[in-house]
Image (tube, helix red, strand yellow):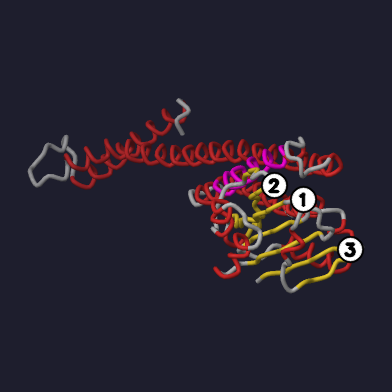
């Protein structure tokens, strides 16, 4: 699907197609073209009308690329990631948003629905200044919304980590290791996404490219500050989850040691009892110390109970149980 918005004469209106005259140097028309899950025919708009580099077009039409920014002379090519945390799936779902920024146009390409772009498309239909401030300012608005959408997902991560910590220290069990490792994978995905985007937006904020004027650069600095804080929180999550995993493994190990200690005490107590019952349970005549069979039975029972009691007392005194 292709959406085209053109701004001219102080008004922004939808258009059915991109006129080549709008892309000529000095054109008074500002254009925003959004390609949502483009077909091969729709994708040719990038090469046939805008004449973007074939490598940039190939990246834009693919589904998975790392965040980056590249200059192609008279336009910029950016890749950023929108993120949507799916709590039931315990994973981060991300999708690329590709930006082609020129002096008079902005082209966005994405294969999945984007809340930020949908919201901005709605604003463009009601507020002419959204596109009237220029393509760079419009790109900043979209990127700012993408970054703002991270905050609720970060809060969900924080709540989930608090719940894991409470569960580990109150009712730790081996099953928690899978949940902790799933969370650790999510945090690693967050860092992998946010850190490169911080660097990309940082380059926009430093005015490395002529398409970003001073006013828009100041706006990107604010977005960069938000990304820096997100990176710091991701690193903090990484430290917490690593410590939590170590604590969980330590608790499970202590529980296992307690079980093994009890089993060892039981086995140790029964060792002399097994010897005595085995010795007097053989099918041969053995001396009974002059006692009858019944009295000898109770004597052996008392002897075994006495040995067990002495051993348990000694283990208790040594602090083993």
- Hey, which residue is sitting farthest right in the picture? 10
Instruction: Look at the numbered discs 2 and 1 and tell me whether their residues touch, using CB distance below 8 Å.
Output: yes
Q: Which residue is mark 3?
A: 128
Relative to 251, 232 lies left or right: right
Q: Which residue is mark 2?
A: 74
Tag shown at residue 306: none
Image coordinates for residue 311, horizontal then vertical, percent: 37, 32
Q: Main secondary structure of the magenta part?
A: helix
The answer to whether residue 113 is magenta is no
Q: Name the residue: 16% across, 34% down.
A: 289
Residue at mark 2 to residue at mark 1: CA–CA distance? 8 Å
Image coordinates for residue 166, horizontal then vertical, percent: 65, 47
Mark 1 neighbour class, 10 Å CA radius: few under 14, some 14 to 19, many 20 or more: many
Residues in magenta, as a range: 185-203
Instruction: Look at the numbered discs 3 and 2 and tell me whether their residues touch, using CB distance below 8 Å.
Output: no
- The secondary structure type at the circle numbered 2 is loop
Q: Earlier in the sequence, mark 3 or mark 2?
A: 2
Viewer-proximal residue among 220 and 297: 220
Residue at mark 1 to residue at mark 3: CA–CA distance? 18 Å
């Amino acid at each position: 699907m292709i959406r085209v918005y053109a701004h001219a004469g102080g008004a922004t209106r939808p258009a059915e197609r991109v006129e080549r005259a709008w892309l000529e140097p000095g054109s008074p028309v500002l254009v925003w073209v959004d390609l949502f899950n483009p077909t091969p025919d729709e994708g040719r708009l990038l090469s046939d009308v805008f004449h973007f580099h074939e490598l940039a077009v190939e990246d834009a039409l693919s589904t998975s690329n790392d965040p980056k920014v590249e200059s192609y002379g008279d336009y910029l090519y950016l890749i950023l990631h929108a993120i949507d945390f799916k709590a039931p799936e315990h994973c981060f779902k991300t999708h690329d948003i590709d930006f082609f920024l020129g002096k008079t146009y902005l082209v966005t390409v994405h294969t999945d629905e984007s809340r930020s772009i949908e919201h901005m498309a709605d604003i463009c239909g009601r507020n002419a200044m959204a596109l009237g401030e220029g393509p760079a300012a419009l790109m900043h608005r979209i990127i700012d919304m993408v970054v703002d959408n991270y905050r609720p997902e970060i809060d969900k991560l924080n709540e989930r980590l608090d719940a894991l910590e409470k569960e580990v220290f109150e009712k730790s069990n081996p099953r928690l290791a899978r949940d902790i490792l799933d969370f650790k994978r999510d945090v690693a995905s967050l860092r992998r996404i946010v850190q490169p985007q911080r660097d990309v937006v940082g380059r926009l904020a430093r005015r490395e490219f002529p398409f970003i004027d001073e006013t828009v650069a100041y706006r990107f600095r604010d977005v960069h500050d938000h990304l820096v804080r997100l990176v710091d929180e991701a690193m903090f999550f990484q430290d917490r989850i690593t410590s939590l995993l170590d604590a969980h493994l330590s608790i499970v190990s202590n529980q296992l040691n307690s079980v093994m200690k009890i089993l060892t005490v039981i086995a140790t107590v029964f060792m002399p009892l097994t010897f005595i019952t085995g010795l007097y349970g053989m099918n041969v005549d053995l001396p009974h110390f002059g006692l009858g069979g019944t009295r000898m039975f109770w004597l052996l029972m008392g002897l075994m109970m006495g040995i067990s009691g002495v051993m348990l007392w000694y283990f208790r005194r040594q602090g083993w149980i």
